[in-house]
């Protein structure tokens, strides 16, 4: 009896002395193509064919059973990460895969990858020299002084980078398990040391006052005021547009974040669902924004025909969006003026959380203001910056016991 369409076919090739099965199966690009399996035993051939057809029906590409780590990573990035994650996340995963995972594990058969393979790989990553890997010293030309001239500088990866590499591999293998390409995630069998973050990363009250005073002399005073008082992320600040501000209600709606992805400056949706939020504006921030709007109007007149109307609140002097990395040019002098050491711009966000919690503001209110995905994140930031409060608590205990 003739097989129905889609059932596939099983036949014997006398010239090969083997049984063959053939069917149209799902490919990684979403199309269907005819593929064959074979065996000396007819029942084994039928079993192989039915197994591939079953996986194809579940949306698993036919070649998945024989994928290398490299092939699966490319499939995962294109068909799973890219459609579901933020562009910046996809870019970061692709970079880690291309630079670290594929060169070391790419040729390994995915189903043969073991916990021992991952453990050895992570050990190799921890001990490698980044200068040798990326050729930093070679770019110095005649001024080469380490790796390019045979004197390895042993520039080891940070704990944070090692943690990121392991996380990308773990996430990729978790997707392979969900896709039923693997039975288990062997990356979960290997533990790596988590990155250690410095405590007291936020600004103190006195430092915050100094920073605001120094910022008044810059054209971006309003930006630093919003960063400190409202804990907005850098991309959220640079993604603000004038129509996001409700002057009557004195609120600002966080709808987008500005990021450079694959060489293009993009306005994308906020980091998480909780990141999209409406926050009340205190009078100081309202005044700062009004002054900034007047200043921008003057810059528009000065620029004349060079002005490009983008609608953004914080722009260059000709109206174009500010490149996120270029914000450092204004931040570093302010940081020095306020004696903030090597504090990052992002630490102003931590400062907002810390100062609000020290004022006994309930954590869930702080979470709503800064847009953390979970209140535990809010408390984790505070825990990194609360040595002063710990000291006060211990002093109070000492006074109580001594009294």
Image (cartoon, rainbow, N blue to C red):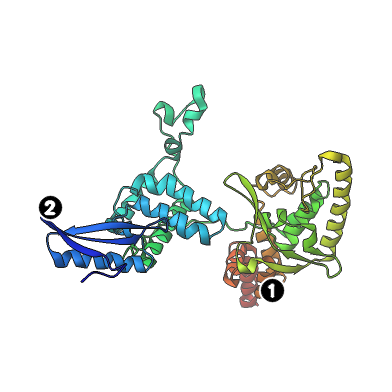
The residue shown at (62%, 56%) is 201
When asked about the image quadrant of residue 72, the answer is bottom left
In the rendered view, tell whether residue 391 sits above or below residue 264: below
Q: Looking at the image, which is closer to me, 244 or 233?
A: 244
Q: Quadrant of the N terminus?
A: bottom left
The residue shown at (51%, 51%) is 92
Q: In the displayed structure, does residue 400 sit left or right of residue 226?
A: left
Q: In the displayed structure, does residue 99 sit left or right of residue 278?
A: left
**Secondary element at image label 1:** helix
Q: Which badge, 2 or 1, is on the more N-terminal residue?
A: 2
Q: Is residue 179 visible?
A: yes
CA–CA distance in space, label 2 to label 1:
73 Å
Q: Choose mark 2 or mark 1, whichever is in front.
A: 2
Q: Position of residue 79 (x, y in %)?
A: 46, 58
Q: Which residue is mark 1?
A: 365
Q: In the displayed structure, does residue 383 sit left or right of residue 228?
A: left
Q: Is residue 122 visible?
A: no
Q: Quadrant of the C terminus?
A: bottom right
In the rendered view, tell whether residue 96 sits above or below residue 31: above
Which label number is shown at residue 16? 2
**Secondary element at image label 2:** loop
Q: Looking at the image, which is closer to me, 8 or 311?
A: 8
The residue shown at (86%, 45%) is 300
Q: How many marks?
A: 2
Q: Looking at the image, which is closer to me, 3 or 90?
A: 3
Q: In the displayed structure, does residue 64 sit left or right of residue 46?
A: right
Q: Position of residue 381 (x, y in %)?
A: 60, 64
Within 10 angstroms of label 1, few (less than 14), some, or many (20 or more) residues? few
Which label number is shown at residue 65? none
């Amino acid at each position: 009896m003739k097989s129905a369409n889609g059932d596939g076919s099983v036949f014997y090739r006398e010239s090969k002395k083997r049984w063959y099965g053939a069917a149209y199966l799902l490919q990684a690009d979403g199309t269907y193509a005819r593929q064959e399996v074979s065996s000396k035993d007819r029942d084994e051939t039928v079993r192989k064919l039915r197994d591939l057809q079953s996986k194809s029906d579940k949306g698993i590409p036919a070649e998945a059973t024989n994928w290398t780590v490299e092939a699966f990573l490319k499939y995962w990035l294109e068909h799973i990460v890219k459609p579901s994650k933020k562009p910046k996340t996809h870019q970061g995963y692709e970079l880690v895969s291309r630079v670290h995972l594929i060169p070391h594990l790419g040729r390994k058969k995915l189903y043969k990858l073991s916990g021992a393979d991952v453990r050895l790989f992570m050990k190799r990553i921890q001990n490698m020299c980044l200068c040798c890997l990326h050729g930093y010293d070679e770019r110095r030309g005649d001024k080469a002084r380490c790796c390019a001239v045979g004197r390895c500088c042993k520039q080891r990866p940070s704990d944070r980078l090692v943690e990121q590499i392991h996380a990308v591999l773990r996430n990729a293998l978790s997707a392979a398990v969900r896709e039923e390409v693997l039975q288990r995630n062997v990356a979960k069998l290997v533990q790596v040391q988590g990155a250690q973050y410095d405590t007291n990363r936020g600004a103190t009250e006195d430092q915050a006052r100094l920073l605001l005073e120094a910022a008044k002399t810059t054209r971006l005073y309003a930006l630093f005021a919003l960063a400190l008082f409202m804990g907005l992320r850098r991309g959220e600040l640079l993604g603000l547009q004038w129509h996001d501000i409700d002057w009557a209600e004195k609120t600002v709606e966080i709808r987008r974040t500005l990021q450079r992805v694959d060489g293009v400056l993009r306005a994308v949706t906020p980091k998480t669902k909780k990141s999209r939020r409406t926050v009340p504006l205190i009078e100081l921030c309202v005044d700062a924004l009004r002054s900034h709007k007047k200043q921008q109007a003057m810059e528009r007149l000065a620029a004349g025909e060079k002005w490009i109307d983008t609608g953004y609140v914080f722009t260059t002097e000709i109206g174009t969006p500010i490149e996120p990395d270029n914000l450092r040019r204004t931040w570093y002098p302010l940081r020095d003026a306020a004696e903030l050491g090597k504090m990052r711009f992002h630490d102003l966000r931590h400062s907002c959380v810390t100062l609000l919690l020290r004022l006994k503001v309930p954590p869930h209110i702080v979470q709503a203001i800064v847009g953390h995905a979970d209140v535990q994140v809010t408390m984790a930031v505070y825990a990194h910056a609360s040595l002063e409060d710990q000291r006060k608590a211990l002093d109070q205990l000492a006074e109580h016991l001594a009294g």
